[in-house]
Amino acid sequence: MSFGRLRETIRKLKKTTANDKELKQIREDASPLVRAAHQPTLENQELRAQLDLPEPNVTPLHRRR
């Protein structure tokens, strides 16, 4: 193997290692982000359910014009 090919192989391996670290970080961040996005959805469902009650204790806000 020539010196140039060796350097290129090392460069590719370093890049792959960096990508593995990024992927690991993305995987770690994904779960909290999903929970953060899911929370407003649940709260919205609860508020809509309260609006469907005979006497809702939620007052809908009207859009500004």
Image: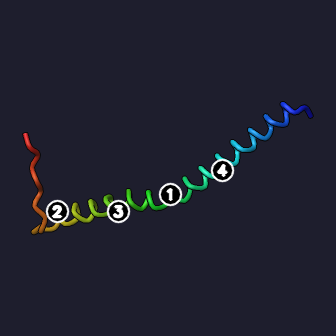
Residue denoted by label 3: 39
Placement of 3 over or under 59, stated as above or below: above
Q: Residue at x 87, y 33 (%)?
A: 3
Residue denoted by label 4: 20
Q: Secondary structure at mark 3?
A: helix
Within 10 angstroms of label 1, few (less than 14), some, or many (20 or more) residues? few
Residue type, mark 2 in image: Leu
Within 10 angstroms of label 3, few (less than 14), some, or many (20 or more) residues? few
Q: Position of residue 32 (x, y in %)?
A: 45, 61
Residue type, mark 1 in image: Asp
Q: Residue at x 72, y 44 (%)?
A: 14
Cα distance in 3D space between marks 1 and 4 = 14 Å
In the displayed structure, does residue 61 sit left or right of residue 42? left
Cα distance in 3D space between marks 2 and 4 = 47 Å
Q: Earlier in the sequence, mark 4 or mark 3?
A: 4
Residue type, mark 3 in image: Gln
Which mark's residue is nearer the viewer, 1 or 2?
1
Q: Position of residue 25 (x, y in %)?
A: 56, 55
Q: Earlier in the sequence, mark 2 or mark 4?
A: 4
Q: Earlier in the sequence, mark 1 or mark 2?
A: 1
Which mark's residue is nearer the viewer, 2 or 4?
4
